[in-house]
Image (cartoon, rainbow, N blue to C red):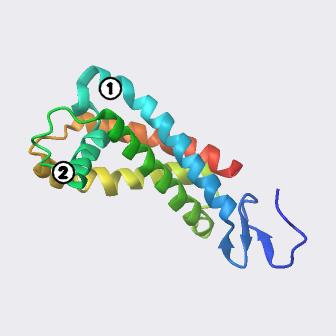
Amino acid sequence: MACRDHRHSRVSPRGNFLQKEGLLASSTLLGAAFAGLVAAAVMTLFEFPFWRRWGMNGVAEWQTNWVIISKLTRGPSNRIQSPRISWTIALHLWHGVVAGIVFGLLLPFLTLLPAGSFSVPLDAVGYSVALWVIFMLAPRRAFESARETRISDCSLSVALASHLVYGIFLGLLVPLA
C-alpha cells in the first residue's frame, strides 16, 4: 500500500490516502481521477435508458453539456438540432474525472467535519448532491436561456438520481485508489 517507514509520510485517519508532507500523493489523485471516470461511466449507463426514452430532454446533464459544447464550438445552441452524442458523453465523462479529482483533494478535509468521519461513500453521496445543486439546479435558468429550451423537472430528477449513483460508485472506488 504505502511507504509507512518514511518519516515524512503518514496515512490519513481513513487509512486510504497516503499524504506526504501534507500533500496527496500523485498516485492517489490518479486513482481518484480513475474512480471519477468509472463512476461517471456507470452514471452515464444509468442515464442512457432515459435518453433512449425521452431523447436529449430526458437527461439534464446532457442538455447542459449540449449548451457547453455549442459555446465551445462557437455555434449557436439553438441551431444545433441534433448534437453529437459522443461529444456530450465525452464531456460528461470528463466532468466525472474532474469531480473525482476534486473529491480526492477534499476528502482529507471532510474528515475534519463533525459528520465527516462516518464513511467515504456517505461523503461521496453528499458531495454528488452538492454537485447537483451547484451545477444543475442553481444554473438551470441560465442554461435554459442559453439554449432557449426548458430543462424539465423530470430531467432534473433523473439528474439527481444519476448523481446519487455517481456518489455511491465514487465513494466505493476512491478508497481503493
Q: Which residue in the rendered view is the most extreme toward the right?
A: 5
C-alpha span from label 2 to label 1: 20 Å
Does residue 168 show up? no
Q: Eyeballing the image, is 17 above or below 86?
A: below
Label 1 environment density (alpha carbons within 10 Å; few <14, some 14–19, many ≥20)? some
Q: In the image, residue 113 lies at what x, y percent?
A: 57, 68
Q: In the image, residue 134 lies at what x, y percent?
A: 33, 57
- In the rendered structure, the answer to whether residue 85 lies left or right of residue 117 reads left
Q: Eyeballing the image, is 125 above or below 53?
A: below
Q: Quadrant of the N terminus?
A: bottom right
Q: Nearer the viewer, residue 67 or 46?
A: 67
Q: Nearer the viewer, residue 130 or 20?
A: 20
Secondary structure under tag 1 reads: helix
- In the rendered structure, the answer to whether residue 4 lies left or right of residue 151 reads right
Amino acid found under the numbered disc labelled 2: Phe
The quadrant holding residue 161 is: top left
Q: In the image, residue 81 lies at what x, y percent?
A: 14, 33
What residue appears at the point 47 percent right and 56 percent down from the top-left corner? 98
- In the rendered structure, the answer to whether residue 40 lies left or right of residue 131 reads right
Q: Eyeballing the image, is 117 above or below 89?
A: below
Amino acid found under the numbered disc labelled 1: Phe
Task: Say which mark, if any, is on residue 143.
Answer: 2
What residue appears at the point 69 percent right and 60 percent down from the top-left corner? 27
Secondary structure under tag 2 reads: helix
What residue appears at the point 38 percent right and 31 percent down from the top-left corner? 47
Residue that label 1 marks: 50
